[in-house]
Image: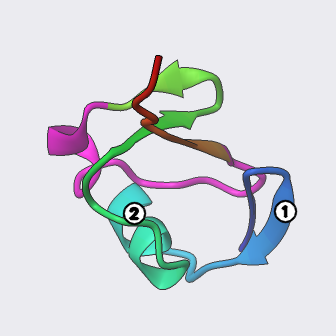
């Protein structure tokens, strides 16, 4: 099934979860925030969050500085 991660179309298995899609595409488990269809998904929910066709995932990296 097709999904979009950070604006790029990707293919994932029909039974993919948010956690499996992030792992497949090398997204680190720490230092990132993830939104699915515009709503932030807590890290504890990634494994149980099923994806749907045309889901839009945005991965934001935490940056420190001043």
Q: As rendered, which of 65 and 29 lies closer to the eye?
A: 65
**Residue that lies at the very extreme toward the front in this rendered image:** 66
Q: Who's the residue at 26% across and 31% down the image?
A: 42
Q: As rendered, which of 66 and 32 lies closer to the eye?
A: 66
Q: CA distance from mark 2 to mark 1?
A: 18 Å
Q: Which residue is mark 2?
A: 17
Q: Quadrant of residue 53?
A: bottom right
Above-or-below relation of 65 to 17: above
Judge left or right: residue 54 versus residue 47. Answer: right
Q: Quadrant of residue 15?
A: bottom left
Above-or-below relation of 26 to 35: below
Question: Which mark lies nearer to you, 2 or 1?
Answer: 1
* Tag 1 secondary structure: strand
- Is residue 51 one of those drawn in magenta? yes
Above-or-below relation of 50 to 36: below
Q: Identify the mark at residue 8; answer none if there is no mark.
A: 1
Q: Who's the residue at 62% across and 79% down the image?
A: 12
- Can residue 16 be seen? no
Badge 2 density bin: few <14, some 14–19, many ≥20, Cα 10 Å: some
* Residue 30: % across, % down: 25, 53
Q: As rendered, which of 27 and 18 lies closer to the eye?
A: 27
* Tag 2 secondary structure: loop
Q: Quadrant of residue 17?
A: bottom left
Q: In what quadrant of the picture does the N terminus appear? A: bottom right
Judge left or right: residue 62 versus residue 31. Answer: right
Above-or-below relation of 3 to 1: above
Badge 1 density bin: few <14, some 14–19, many ≥20, Cα 10 Å: few
User: Sequence-wise, which precedes: disc 2 or disc 1?
Assistant: 1
Q: Main secondary structure of the magenta part?
A: loop
Q: Which residues are magenta?
A: 42-56
* Residue 25: % across, % down: 55, 78
């Amino acid at each position: 099934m097709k999904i979009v991660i950070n604006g790029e179309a990707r293919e994932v298995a029909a039974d993919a979860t948010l956690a499996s899609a992030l792992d497949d595409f090398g997204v680190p488990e720490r230092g990132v925030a993830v939104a699915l269809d515009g709503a932030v998904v807590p890290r504890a929910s990634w494994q149980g969050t099923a994806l749907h066709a045309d889901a839009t995932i945005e991965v934001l990296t935490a940056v420190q500085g001043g």
